[in-house]
Image (tube, grey):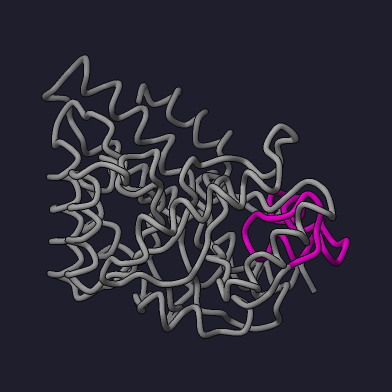
């Protein structure tokens, strides 16, 4: 069955697929060599407004959300019709033993207090690093915490490593403010397309059907520069951008997988829960175009190194 699926997916474009945009680590006020953080957000919002696309932002206090500037940025997103959700205050990793469940829960409540009055606030939580606990007690304890507070999980069906490209782009611009941005944009689009094809095929295998996707990207300089290109690229490939609210209505986004360690993208988590983790190896074995492997952080890093990016 896997072999047949790979042949079909690799031979044909994945047309008529639906996808919603999520942006993590908002507002991310780290200084940038060009386009300061407020301008990055303005550029992203303009790109989305011009293309009639809605997003959901997952916010942290530690990334500037607990400052007047950061709150104003999140307010502007909410006013513009986008959703604002919880990504914890401190961006802690629940798989780390030094982070107690009690402290983690308190940190989540601290972030909720910052954002619950914002326009667009929605009771949805995304785990930092997509890590949902390294023990049954931590995983299920936090599941119970979410249920008690009527919070849904901000699941991801397409994971990406856009932050790696952002780091390289920043370093280049710090040295060469007038560096050519086109190679970064082009590799970024190849990376996102590889991620989309990989996770879409995996999701079809796991769930037995097409699901509306939620892609994970980040509030970064990279997207301040290229988010419009990303939206246009996927539309040209035949994909449709839908609102996060519409995507999250699908029953797969209500799942609380029982894999350990907990978390990761949905297809990954459910495959691990079922004890069936052969997909990635099979996908790698079937691909002939090296661009199809750019979903991997390692392969993306190798390509950046080889291309001098």
Give the left or right position of residue 153, taking residue 166 as reference. Answer: right
Residue visible at 32% across and 46% down in the picture: 65
Q: Quadrant of the C terminus?
A: top left
| For residue 270, above or below residue 26 | below
Residue 179 horizontal/vertical position (percent): 17, 25
Q: Is residue 80 something one can see in this rendering? A: yes
| For residue 141, above or below residue 200 | above
* Quarter of image, res 272: bottom right
Most distant residue in the right direction: 275
Residue visible at 31% across and 44% down in the picture: 66
| For residue 236, above or below residue 164 | below
* Quarter of image, res 166: top left
Residue 48 horizontal/vertical position (percent): 20, 66
Residue 308 horizontal/vertical position (percent): 36, 21
Residue visible at 72% across and 61% down in the picture: 269
Q: Quadrant of the N terminus?
A: bottom right
In the depicted view, which residue is nearer to us: 232 or 11?
A: 232
In the image, the segment drawn in magenta is 257-285
Give the left or right position of residue 96, taking residue 46 as reference. Answer: right
| For residue 92, above or below residue 82 | above
* Quarter of image, res 82: bottom left
Residue visible at 78% across and 64% down in the picture: 271
Q: Is residue 236 something one can see in this rendering? A: no
């Amino acid at each position: 069955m896997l072999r047949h699926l790979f042949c079909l997916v690799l031979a044909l474009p994945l047309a008529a697929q639906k996808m919603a945009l999520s942006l993590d680590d908002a507002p991310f006020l780290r200084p940038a060599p060009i386009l300061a953080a407020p301008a990055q957000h303005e550029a992203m919002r303009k790109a989305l407004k011009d293309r009639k696309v809605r997003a959901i932002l997952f916010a942290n206090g530690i990334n500037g959300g607990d400052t007047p500037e950061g709150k104003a940025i999140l307010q502007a997103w909410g006013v513009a019709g986008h959703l604002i959700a919880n990504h914890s205050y401190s961006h802690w990793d629940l798989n780390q033993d030094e982070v107690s469940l009690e402290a983690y829960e308190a940190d989540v409540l601290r972030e909720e207090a910052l954002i619950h009055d914002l326009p667009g606030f929605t009771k949805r939580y995304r785990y930092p690093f997509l890590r949902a606990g390294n023990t049954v007690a931590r995983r299920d304890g936090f599941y119970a915490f979410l249920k008690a507070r009527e919070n849904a999980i901000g699941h991801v069906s397409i994971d990406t490593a856009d932050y790696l490209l952002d780091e390289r782009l920043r370093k280049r611009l710090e040295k060469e403010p007038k560096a050519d941005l086109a190679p970064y944009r082009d590799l970024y689009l190849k990376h996102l397309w590889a991620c989309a094809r990989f996770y879409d095929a995996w999701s079809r295998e796991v769930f037995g059907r097409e699901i509306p996707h939620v892609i994970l990207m980040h509030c970064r300089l990279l997207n301040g520069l290229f988010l419009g290109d990303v939206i246009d690229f996927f539309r040209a490939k035949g994909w449709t951008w839908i609102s996060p609210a519409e995507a999250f209505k699908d029953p797969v986004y209500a799942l609380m997988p029982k894999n350990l360690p907990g978390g990761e993208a949905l297809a990954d988590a459910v495959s691990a829960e079922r004890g069936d983790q052969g997909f990635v190896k099979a996908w790698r074995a079937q691909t002939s175009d090296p661009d199809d492997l750019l979903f991997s952080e390692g392969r993306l890093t190798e390509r950046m190194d080889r291309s001098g990016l």
